[in-house]
Amino acid sequence: MSEKAFPFYIKTFQHLKLLGRAMFMWIGLYAIMSFEKFPFQVFIYAGCVLFILDTLPNLIVHIQYWLKNRKAVLYINVEEKTILYKSSGYDITGNFQDIKCFSFYSIYGSERGFYSYGVYKYCKIDFHNGKSIIATVLMIPNVEITLQLLLKIQPERHKKFVFCFAK
């Protein structure tokens, strides 16, 4: 890849930013419980509900996205119109015209921010040779808009009901 290629990979700041939403929920719960002087048992029950409905799904999806892109680097060269994806033992090189399908996946309600795992989204690029690339929000912040601008292709949008596992 030339000097003009855009490299994308998982950054520590992106980890912290995404997991920070879940931590913010816990800080909010603690603040409400402290301010209103609820008994400690109410905090425990509310914490269990928050953990099951928000924090645990957040951790599951975060780990799944991390495993999907943990040693991967995606290079997009806009001038040469080429894509290079390197992962442990899995390399793909292709041109923009080799793209068969470009899809974007998110969950229902993710735009409203009701739950911390609503920010987990990903794009899948399928090539004519049967190979595919999955780029998650851990690898590319604002994954849909960034890839849409670089590839100059409108993605097919798909909504998932509960979790947005990268497949």
Image (tube, rainbow, N blue to C red):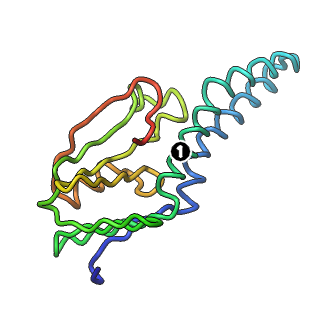
Image vertical order of residue 78 relative to residue 139, above or below: below
Residue in the image at 11% along x and 60% along y:
97
Quadrant of image for the C terminus: top left
Residue in the image at 26% along x and 43% along y:
103
Please name the residue that numbered disc 1 is placed on: 64
- Seen from the viewer's position, the closer of residues 37 and 91 is 91
Amino acid on which disc 1 is placed: Gln
Direction left: furthest residue: 97
Tell me where residue 158 sits by quadrant: top left
Residue in the image at 53% along x and 52% along y:
67
Tell me where residue 90 sits by quadrant: bottom left
Residue 148 position, x and y percent, is 23, 53
Residue 124 position, x and y percent, is 31, 48
Query: How many C-alpha atoms fall within 10 Å of the one at disc 1: few (<14), some, or many (≥20)?
Result: some
Q: Secondary structure at mark 1?
A: helix
Quadrant of image for the N terminus: bottom left
Residue 16 position, x and y percent, is 60, 53
Position of 18 with respect to 86 (left or right) is: right
Image vertical order of residue 127 relative to residue 43, above or below: below
Direction right: furthest residue: 40
Image vertical order of residue 35 relative to residue 152, above or below: above
Position of 44 with respect to 86 (left or right) is: right
Image vertical order of residue 104 relative to residue 38, above or below: below
Residue in the image at 81% along x and 16% along y:
42
Residue 165 position, x and y percent, is 45, 37
